[in-house]
Image (tube, rainbow, N blue to C red):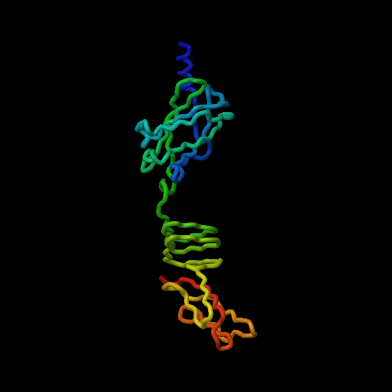
């Protein structure tokens, strides 16, 4: 009988409230979705200090009950002067518990070997962006500014300002592209021997730099200039010993 009374006391006296900022569902990734949760725990009017087991049931609405496969347990969470913080890790296989739902948390706690005690249901405010998992599309219709951005798929932007490195599999710029550093597209080097003309390889490639190396004997460069997607060079009106070039792909 005394134990039953103790459990009832726990049920009616435990209070859990958000401490300051609300909990938000983080953007999903290859490992799933994370909901950070912070709160304050009291027992019989006193702030709890110790380790507590928490159980979070993710329900789709304020009235519904959390499905069995949408219950996530965090054990041995340290609580100091009533304050605690946990991360509710939702794996990819159970993201359906959160995605597309008005998420509510059914919170229970266990302490000193007692049974789980219901603390009520609290709504998780939605974030600006929808939760996603794995790789997806990232489209920028305004301005994108990045010190370093690596894009393995498609990058679409009206205005993109890149101060560092930008690497993209496919890039479509519908507005302005401002690059404060060096921009190179398909750079390749080419070297030709004993000739006056050296051409870049591949369609769309043009010579953007280069020059001849004259053989010994005091020969001088008498011509060095771009020529039909390559480089024309002479040493005293004769073929250069070597023509070195830097080619870039500027077209399709």
In the picture, which quadrant includes the C terminus?
bottom left
Residue found at x 47% / y 61%: 143
Residue reaching furthest to the right = 218
Q: Quick one: which residue is furthest to the top in this view? A: 1
Q: Residue furthest bottom?
A: 237
Question: Residue placed at 48% from the left, 24% from the top?
Answer: 110
**Number of numbered markers:** 0
Q: State the residue at coordinates (53%, 28%).
A: 76
Question: Residue 37 vs residue 100: left or right?
Answer: right
- The percent coordinates of residue 131 (x first, y second) are 41, 46
* Along the viewing direction, whichever of 197 and 210 lies nearer the viewer: 197
Residue 34 lies, in percent from the top left, at: 46, 40
Picture quarter with the N terminus: top left
Residue 98, position in %: x, y?
39, 40
Q: With 145 as the anchor, is 153 left or right in this view?
A: left
Q: Kindly indicate the quadrant of the structure image that contains residue 222.
A: bottom right
Name which residue lies at 60% across and 81% down: 215
Please determine whether, in this image, residue 174 is positioned above or below residue 78. below
Report the front residue among 55 and 60.
Answer: 55
Q: Position of residue 44 (x, y in %)?
A: 53, 21
Please determine whether, in this image, residue 194 is positioned above or below residue 98. below
Whether residue 147 is situated above or below residue 228 in the rendered picture: above
């Amino acid at each position: 009988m005394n134990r039953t009374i103790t459990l009832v006391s726990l049920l009616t006296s435990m209070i859990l409230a958000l401490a300051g900022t609300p909990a938000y569902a983080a953007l999903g990734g290859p490992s799933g979705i994370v909901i950070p949760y912070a709160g304050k725990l009291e027992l019989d009017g006193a702030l709890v200090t110790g380790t507590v087991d928490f159980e979070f049931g993710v329900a789709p609405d304020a009235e519904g009950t959390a499905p069995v496969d949408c219950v996530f347990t965090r054990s041995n969470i340290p609580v100091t002067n009533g304050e605690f913080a946990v991360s509710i890790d939702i794996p990819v296989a159970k993201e359906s518990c959160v995605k597309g739902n008005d998420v509510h948390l059914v919170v229970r706690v266990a302490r000193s070997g007692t049974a789980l005690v219901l603390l009520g249901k609290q709504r998780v405010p939605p974030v600006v962006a929808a939760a996603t998992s794995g790789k997806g599309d990232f489209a920028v219709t305004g301005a994108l500014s990045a010190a370093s951005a690596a894009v393995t798929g498609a990058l679409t932007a009206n205005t993109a300002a890149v101060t560092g490195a930008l690497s993209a599999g496919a890039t479509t710029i519908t507005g302005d592209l401002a690059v404060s550093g060096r921009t190179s597209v398909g750079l390749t080097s080419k070297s030709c021997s004993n000739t006056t003309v050296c051409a870049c390889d591949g369609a769309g490639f043009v010579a953007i730099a280069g020059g001849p190396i004259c053989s010994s004997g005091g020969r001088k460069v008498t011509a060095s200039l771009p020529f039909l997607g390559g480089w024309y060079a002479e040493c005293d009106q004769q073929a250069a010993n070597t023509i070195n070039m830097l080619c870039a792909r500027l077209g399709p």
